Amino acid sequence: MTTATTPTARHTAPKVRRRGERSPLASTALHLTLIVASVIAVFPVLWVLLTSLKPAEFATTTDFFKDTTFENYTNLIKDTKFLTWFGNSLVVAGLTTLIGVIVSASTGYAVSRFRFPGKRGLMWTLLITQMFPVAVLIVPIYNIMASMGLLNKPAGLVITYLTISVPFCAWMMKGFFDTIPREIDESGQVDGLTPFGTFWRLILPLAKPGLAVTAFYSFITAWGEVAYASAFLVGEDNLTLAGGLQLFVNRYGAQWGPMTAASVLIAIPAALVFLFAQKHLVTGMSAGAVKG
């Protein structure tokens, strides 16, 4: 007589997640974190934009959509010298960007490709200049500009901003040029090109990502800087946007309407430059960090 056997209970094997797959709880927590971070990042910008569209009497209230008006923008343009400040900033930032790209690219290429006396000292100098804060440099640079007669002139401010942007951008461009094969230079020499011809015709077209990052950094350095602009420029006709905005703040309070309207208008050129250069930013910065 055979004994019937009862089947053993089958245990369901635990589900094995594939690599990179998250649990529902982890996915929910991640999305909530991203939403909170996005709100925190966007909130100040949105606050400034909505405040610029409110009448002056409601500037400090949270009633953003009451009596929406463009009066702050019209008063800013008509009653202040905002357009003059805007033009001064465009001149300073444009010259800083143009000269900064030329000097940084040529310096980075020379250090990357050639051997010459003082090369190591030059690289150390470019690096050490980045270690000093503005508070330490502003007085000696002020004295230098005063001795050269460049105070209260755009040229003095452009030179000052170049001392900030060029060292960093030259280091970055040097690392970017290191990633470009030297065989390209040799092929240019075989074709009879001079070193400058090789640099201009063959290397620069391949260095567009690095040049975009250099231009973006130089522009933002000059466009948003406050300390040097406030110290070196006086008189409403000579001010840049950084100095002009300070006129809306005094010991008794702040004119939030025109200040927020000016902030929105100031952000537009920076946003346009970023949109123009954004496709090259990641490539340029990552390539420039490969070799130093």
Image (cartoon, rainbow, N blue to C red):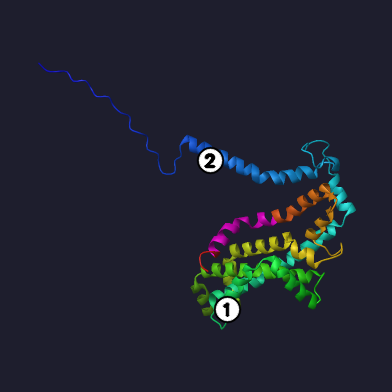
Looking at the picture, tell me which residue is in the foreground, 231 or 73.
Answer: 231
Image quadrant where residue 138 sits: bottom right
Say the numbered circle drawn on residue 30. 2
Mark 1: which secondary structure?
helix
Name the residue beneath numbered marker 1: 121
Disc 2 residue crowd, few under 14, some 14–19, many 20+, Cα 10 Å: few
Say the numbered circle drawn on residue 43. none
Q: Start and end of the magenta stretch?
A: 272-287
Counting residues from the start of the chain, the first of labels 1 and 2 encountered is: 2
The x, y position of residue 5, in whole percent, is: 18, 20
Q: Residue at x 62, y 65 (%)?
A: 211
Residue at the farthest bottom position: 117
Q: Amino acid at mark 1?
A: Gly
* Any part of residue 51 in sight: yes
Looking at the picture, tell me which residue is in the foreground, 71 or 143.
Answer: 143
Q: Residue at x 74, y 69 (%)?
A: 158
